[in-house]
Amino acid sequence: MRWAAEGLITRRRPVPDADTPQQRAFEARLVAGLSGGAILGLTGIRPSPGEPVLFLHPARAQEVIDSALPRLDGTGAVHGVPGLRLVRDGGAWWFTDVAGQARVRLEHPHPKWRPRGQGRGLRPVEQAGGHGPASQDRDRLLSRVLRRLRLITTAGAEHGWVRLRTTGSYDLVIDCCCGSGALRLMRGLRQSGLADGAEAEDGGYPGDVGLGDAAVAVRHASCGSFPEAVDVRRLGWAAC
């Protein structure tokens, strides 16, 4: 009610946006860095305007840490989230952006949980470059995706399959193994005000949501295109 009174949320936009461009950019990079199935290492989010809280899956929390921390492969390519660091502050663990003031708090169901691996000083190769003229639209759209995390994890809970990826055509593609899960996710994203205006309800291709020059696509992919699931029993019974 306070957020509504302050104009942070409305009936058409029930989830608060990040309150600074730096926070939006950091959250957008975090979504891109959690490509593949690592997003299922998160179970939900408390999307406050300034410092949202990510809730970690008790058995997959380290997968989130390993996917987000920046690292170099054998070819020198950067993986993870450029400029992200894992720090301890005020008794809590945070993903922070060393180049700015943005950060996201991590919450694990076990109070004594300790992650493995921490970042070091910022390296030039990690600098997060711009995304061309559409960067502000992309940051806003992907930040909003993170703040609607529960919609994605709910879609993945049907059979345990959901995957994020980037392509040359879309800023983000969300693959679901179930057609029904993909449809519900698409409907939920639109109803949550992911995009602005009429497009949030019925504009564009049925599997796409656009905001300015940025776009997110939700797709139904067959179970055979996903890696082996974690903690999914009797997979042979699934019907996609």
Image (tube, rainbow, N blue to C red):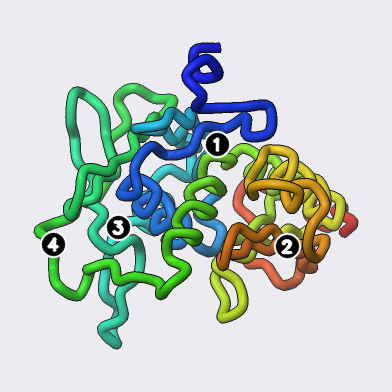
Mark 2 / mark 3, whichever is N-terminal: 3
Give how far across and how far down residue 239 sits, in percent: 90, 56
How much space separates mark 2 and mark 3, taking CA atoms?
29 Å
* 191 relative to 171 in the view: left or right: right
Q: Residues within 10 Å of mark 2 (few under 14, many from 20)?
A: some
- For disc 1, the marked residue is 43
How much space separates mark 4 and mark 2, taking CA atoms?
35 Å
* 130 relative to 46 in the view: left or right: left
Q: Residues within 10 Å of mark 4 (few under 14, many from 20)?
A: some
The label nearer to you, 2 versus 1, is: 2
How much space separates mark 3 and mark 4, taking CA atoms?
12 Å
Give how far across and how far down residue 102 sits, in percent: 27, 43
The label nearer to you, 4 versus 2, is: 2
- For disc 4, the marked residue is 122
Q: Residues within 10 Å of mark 3 (few under 14, many from 20)?
A: many
- Residue 208 numbered mark, or none: 2
Give the residue displayed 35% in from the left and 32% down from the top: 50
Contact check, label 4 and label 2, Cβ < 8 Å: no
Helix, strand or loop at label 3? It is: loop
Give how far across and how far down residue 150 sits, in percent: 61, 37
Amino acid identity at mark 3: Leu
How much space separates mark 2 and mark 1, taking CA atoms?
24 Å
The label nearer to you, 3 versus 4, is: 4
The label nearer to you, 4 versus 1, is: 4
How much space separates mark 3 and mark 1, taking CA atoms?
19 Å
Amino acid identity at mark 4: Leu
